[in-house]
Image (cartoon, rainbow, N blue to C red):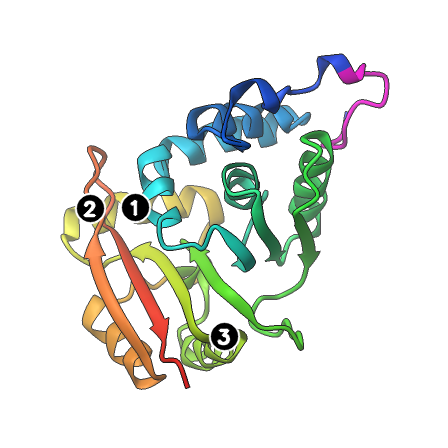
Amino acid sequence: MTSAENPTEPVSARVQTSSRTLHGRATGASAIRDVIHSFRNPIARAYSRVRFAIVRQPFLEEIGQYLPDSGDVLDLGCGFGLFSLFYAMTKPGLQIVAVDLDPGRVAAATASAEYLELTNVAYEASDVTTWATERQFDAIYMLDLLHHLPQSRVRAFLAVVAGLVRPGGTVIIKDVADRPRYKMLFTLLLDRLLVGMEPIRYWPPDELLAILRGLGFDVAMHRMNDVLPYPHILYVCRRRAS
């Protein structure tokens, strides 16, 4: 069976998010369970379990505090759509556009959104470095994307992103730092298992900070502590109001 919803499954068997909501929002723990359950393909479901074990609920809530409660949000490099589905459920006032290079993952994300009966998230299959739109967004986020992009294209990509966020809006970048070295090597091992030998670069924080500030952002940066040996780092970039 593909990742699409089983058409013979009765509506009553679908995830009932309304029974696990607070003031119209899905709670974080129930949203994660529902997103995982929404994938009909067992490989995608297993991947979603692993991904949520790495980027866990406290991390998602830490990132989510920088997203508005309502408005237009862009998810770049969305993969299977795990985090856009999560935020669409926990922040129903958002209208989310999510973009990923892999058409199969985009199809799986779209099927999951339909299964969850979410109307506030839409997916597009495109290379994020060449994707174009006339729209601007109140917030943009990218989780573990930058280290997979060619180093030579990152500054130009971030310059385009700067033009996509409205004045006063926020760009949130969660990525992997190059230090401590043992944490970086642990993360590299796992990335190699997932993506093979494609180029990977974990940006030194000072180097990425300089690029972001050079593009006109006010940037706050901090590490995200984890019991697992991942050197998570978060950049919260505010575009100055004109």
Looking at the picture, tell me which residue is in the foreground, 109 or 237.
237
Residue occupying the point 53% across, 26% down? 46
Q: Is residue 169 left or right of residue 86?
A: left
Q: Which residue is mark 3?
A: 166
Examine the rendered structure and indicate whether residue 80 appears above or below residue 131.
Answer: above
Give the x, y percent position of residue 183: 20, 46
Judge whether residue 204 can be spotted in this image. no
Quadrant position of the N terminus in the picture: top right
**Quick check: 221 left or right of 41?**
left
Residue placed most toward the observer, 2 or 99: 99
Asked if the stretch drawn in magenta spans residue 186, the answer is no
In the image, 230 versus 124, the foreground residue is 124
Magenta region's main secondary structure? loop
**Residue, disc 2:** 183
* Mark 3 crowdedness (10 Å alpha carbons): few <14, some 14-19, many ≥20: many
Q: Which residues are magenta?
A: 2-11
Amino acid at pointer 2: Lys
Q: Write the residue at 65% across / 47% down.
A: 120
Q: Are marks 1 and 2 in contact (CB under 8 Å)?
A: yes
Between marks 1 and 3, how big is the CA–CA gap? Answer: 33 Å
**Above or below 119: residue 71:** below
Disc number lying in front (3 or 2): 3
Q: Residue at x 22, y 67 (%)?
A: 205
Say if mark 1 contacts mark 3, CB within 8 Å.
no
Which residue position holds label 1?
Answer: 187
User: How many residues crowd around disc 1 within 10 Å: few (fewer than 14), some, or many (20 or more)?
Assistant: some
State the separation of the CA atoms marked 1 and 2.
6 Å
Q: Residue 128 at x, y = what percent?
A: 57, 66
Secondary structure of the residue carrying tag 3 is strand
